Amino acid sequence: MVRVRIGWLVALVVLVGGMLALSAAATPFQLDDLQKLVRLSDPQISPDGKSIALVVSTPDWKTDKNKSEIDVVTVATAARRTLTHDRENVSMPRWSPDGTLLAFLAKDSKSKKKQIYVMPLAGGDAQRITEVKEGVVEFTWSPDSSRIAYITQDPPVNEKAIKEHDKAFQVTDGNFLLREAVAPWHLWVVDAAGGTPTRLTEGSFSLQTEQEGATPLVWSHDGKFIVFTKFPSPYWGPSFRSVIAEVPASGHGKPTTLVSDRGANDFAYAPDSNTFAFLRARNGDENNGNAVYVGGNGPARDATAALARNFNAYAWLSNGKALLLQGELGTNSVLWEQPLNGAARVLQLGDIAAGSQFTVAKNGEIAFLGSTPTHPDELYVMTLPNAKPRRLTDVNAFVDKLELGRTESVQWKNDGFDEDGALTYPVGYRKGKAAPLVLLIHGGPESASTTRFSPLAQLLSAAGFLVFQPNYRGSTNLGDAYQHAIFRNTGEGPGQDVMAGVAAVEKLGIVDKNRIGVSGWSYGGYMTTWLTGHYDAWKAAVSGAALTDWVMDYTIAYYQMGDVYFFGSTPWTNEGWEIWRQQSPITSVRNVKAPTLIMGDVGDSNVPLVNSYEWYHGLRDNGVTVEFWAYPADTHFPGDIVQQTDVYRRWVGWMKKYLE
C-alpha cells in the first residue's frame, strides 16, 4: 500500500499459461520481453524549449541491474544523443536557467553515494561539485545559475555512541525493521562550480522522510529565499502534518512558515510572479484526492474545486495564468488545462495515456511521457496545450511487432456508484469463445487501473486469459466521493465493487465461469485475501505483499498513520477496536478454499511480510493448498529484473496449474 501523495504503488500481476489457440503467425508479449523494455523517466525541457533531457534505463540480465543514462532529444528533429557514459545510477537531469549547463546526480565511485555533477553543454566533461558523506537526494539551480541548493541526510542521531558500540535507539514512529534512529534530511547550498557548501537548515524536522523522497526545492525569483516542504520528523508517520517553509539562501536566518495548511507539499511559483501553488489533500481530508491550491494574494484557494477529484501532479503553464494537471479520468490517464479563473478542459491526446512526469518550457512547449494501450512509455511534446502531441522517441519499437491483446473500458453500477475497469482480451481471441478470467487488482488503494499499456496484463493476455482490472471505491479515477467511500469500509465495500465488475464482464458472455482466478499485489493482495475469504468463486489466487491483519500492520509498518485515515482512529481505542479487526482478511481465513500462491519481500517495511506469514499458516493449517515464496529484498516489490521475472514466472505457473 502507498498513499496517493507519495506516489502510489499499483497492483502487479503476470503471465499465466496459454489457454486459447493463437494463430501461427502471432508473436505475443513474453517473459523475455520484460528484459527489452526501456524505461524513460524525469523528462526536463530546456529553457528555450529546443531540447529535452531525460533518463533512459535498460535492464541488464547479467548484472541484474538497470543501466541508466541521460539522453538529450532535439525537439525539432527528434534526434537523440547520450550525454553520460559509464556512470552508475544517474538521475535528476536539471538545466541551468541560462541553458548553458546540465546538472545531474550519479553515484560517485569513491564514496558510493550520489553526488551532483555539472556538465557544460558547449562541450567538456561533467565535474563533481559535491562530496557529501550521506549523498544528495534532491537539488535545484538558483535563478541566476550561480548556485545549487541540495538536500542531504545528517549523520546518525547517536553517531558518537554508535562508535563506542552503544547502538540502542528509541522507538517512536518507525517501522519494526529499523536498526537505528533515522536522522533528518536538511538543506545546503553550494556554488555551481563547487567549493565549500553552506548549511541552511538544522533541527529535528526534516526535508524528507525515510520512505518518501523530498519534494522539489524552489528558489524565490530574486534568489534570496529557498522554499521547501517541512516535515515534522524524518519518519513517514507524521508526514501528513507537513507545511511549506522558506529560508534565506544566504545562510543568515532561520526558516519561517510560508504555507501553514497541514499536509501542504509540492510547492511551485508561477513564472515571473509571487503567485504560487501547492498540493494538498482536498480540504485537509486525507481520504480525498490531491487538490491544487493557489495562493500568494490572500488565503490559498482550491483551484481545482470544481473538478473535485485527485491529481497526481501539476505544473504552471508558461503564461502563469493556468495550471497543467495530470490524473486518471475513468479508465484514461489525462492532462487538464486549469485556468486560475475559469473551467478546466481535458487536453485532446488521442489514445495517449499521459503519465505524471511532464515539464513546461518558457516558450510554452510541454514535454511528457505517455503510453497507448499497445505501446509502452515514450517521450511526447506539444507546442501548445491545444496542439496534437508529437512522439519524439521510439525506444520500445519492438513492441509494435508483437501481437497484443485488445484492451477496452468496462462500466457498471453498484451501490449508487458508476464504476469501471479495464478489460484485456486474449491474444487471437475469437468472438463467441468463452475464456478463463484472471483478475488483476490494483494496489494503493488510492490508485487506478486504466487502459494504458500494461506488460503484466499483456503477459496474461498472451497466455490466453481474459484480464480484468477493476477499480473499486478508494480508487482515484472517479472523483472524491468514490475515493472517500473506502473510509471505514476497506474490505466489504470494495469487495462488492469488484464482484459487481466481475458480473458485468460475465454478462458479455465471454467468461468461462468455472475458471476464474483472483490476484493482486499490495492492496491488490489485500483485496485478493478478502475476496477469497468472502466469496467462493475462485479456482486460484495469487496474493502478493498482502495486508492481512490491519492491527498488526498498524503496529509494525512505517505506513501506520496512513492506516489510521481509513478508519478515523487507531485500533487500540474503543472507537476502532471492532472495525480494525472486522475489516482484516485474517478473520475469515478459515473460509478460504482457493489454492493460493503467496509472495513478498523480506525487508518490506510498507506491508511487512509478517502479514503473509499469518496468511500462510492460516491456510496451511486449514488444509488449503498453499505455497509461500519470499524474496531477499528491502522493497515493496523486487526492483531488479531477475527477481521480477521470477515473480511473474511463479505467478504464471500457479494460474496455469489451477485454471487450465
Image (cartoon, rainbow, N blue to C red):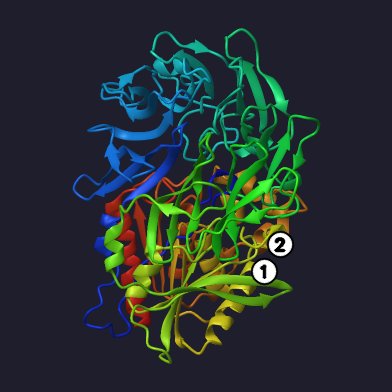
* Residue 148 x, y percent position in the rendering: 47, 19
| Quarter of the view holding residue 418 | bottom right
Residue with the mark numbered 1: 493
* Residue 162 x, y percent position in the rendering: 43, 19
Q: Are marks 1 and 2 in contact (CB under 8 Å)?
A: yes
Q: In this image, 272 relative to 52: left or right?
A: right
Q: Quick one: which residue is furthest to the left in this view?
A: 62
* Residue 11 x, y percent position in the rendering: 48, 60
Question: In the image, what residue occupies the spot 50% across and 54% down?
Answer: 354
* Alpha carbon separation for disc pair 1 and 2: 8 Å
- Going from N to C along the chain, the mark reached first, 1 or 2, is 2
* Residue 156 x, y percent position in the rendering: 47, 21
Near mark 2 (Cα within 10 A), the count class, few <14, some 14-19 or many ≥20, is many
Residue with the mark numbered 2: 485
Question: In the image, what residue occupies the spot 55% across and 44% down?
Answer: 6
Which numbered circle lies on residue 442? none
